Structure formats: structure tokens, C-alpha cells
Amino acid sequence: MFGLEDANVKPYRQGMIPEPEVRPGDNLVGTAANSPGQCIWRRAGSARRFEADCPEGYSF
């Protein structure tokens, strides 16, 4: 890129994004529309949402 001669460089790393895990305090928002058996959760203390397995026995 032009004009970025002194910019910091971060090398590309290969890897996998970890599967999200439900933690104590996370709130169940509802079922995932396109993924049967998956639910949408909201992380405790933030507005971040993620998709993970529904709790056992959960039905909508």
C-alpha cells in the first residue's frame, strides 16, 4: 500500500476459530433460524451474540 512504509506488520496465521461455549450467566435469546438444534445466546455482560447448541430439553 502507498504511504505505509513504517506500518506494523502482523504475519498471517493459520488456525481454527474455537467453537463458542455457553458460560454461566449467558442468556438464551432463541432458536437459530437456519440451524436446527442450535440456539442464539447473548454473552453475559455484553451485547455479543453467538450460536451454540440448545440446552437439553429446550423446545420453542
Image (cartoon, rainbow, N blue to C red):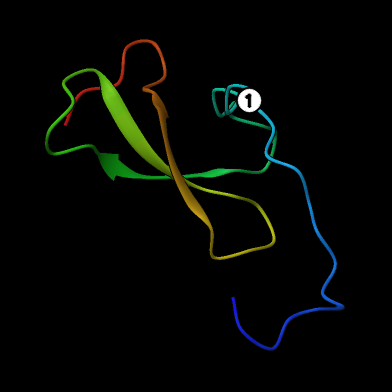
User: Is 38 positioned to the left or the right of 2 in the image?
Assistant: left
Determine the residue positioned at 29% across, 25% down: 38
Relative to 53, say whether 32 is above or below.
below
The percent position of residue 52, horizontal first and vertical second, equals 42, 27
User: Is 25 positioned to the left or the right of 20 in the image?
Assistant: right
- Counting labels gives 1
User: According to the image, label 1 marks what residue?
Assistant: 14
* Residue 31 sits in quarter: top left
User: Is 41 positioned to the left or the right of 6 in the image?
Assistant: left
Q: Secondary structure at mark 1?
A: loop
| The one of 43 and 24 positioned closer to us in this rendering | 43
The percent position of residue 17, horizontal first and vertical second, equals 58, 28
- The residue carrying pointer 1 sits among few (fewer than 14), some (14 to 19) or many (20 or more) residues within 10 Å by Cα, namely few
User: Is 27 positioned to the left or the right of 9 in the image?
Assistant: left
Determine the residue positioned at 87% across, 78% down: 6
Outermost residue to the top? 56
Outermost residue to the left? 34
Amino acid, disc 1: Gln
The percent position of residue 43, horizontal first and vertical second, equals 59, 50
Determine the residue positioned at 18% across, 26% down: 35
Relative to 32, say whether 52 is above or below.
above
The percent position of residue 5, horizontal first and vertical second, equals 80, 79
| The one of 15 and 23 positioned closer to us in this rendering | 15
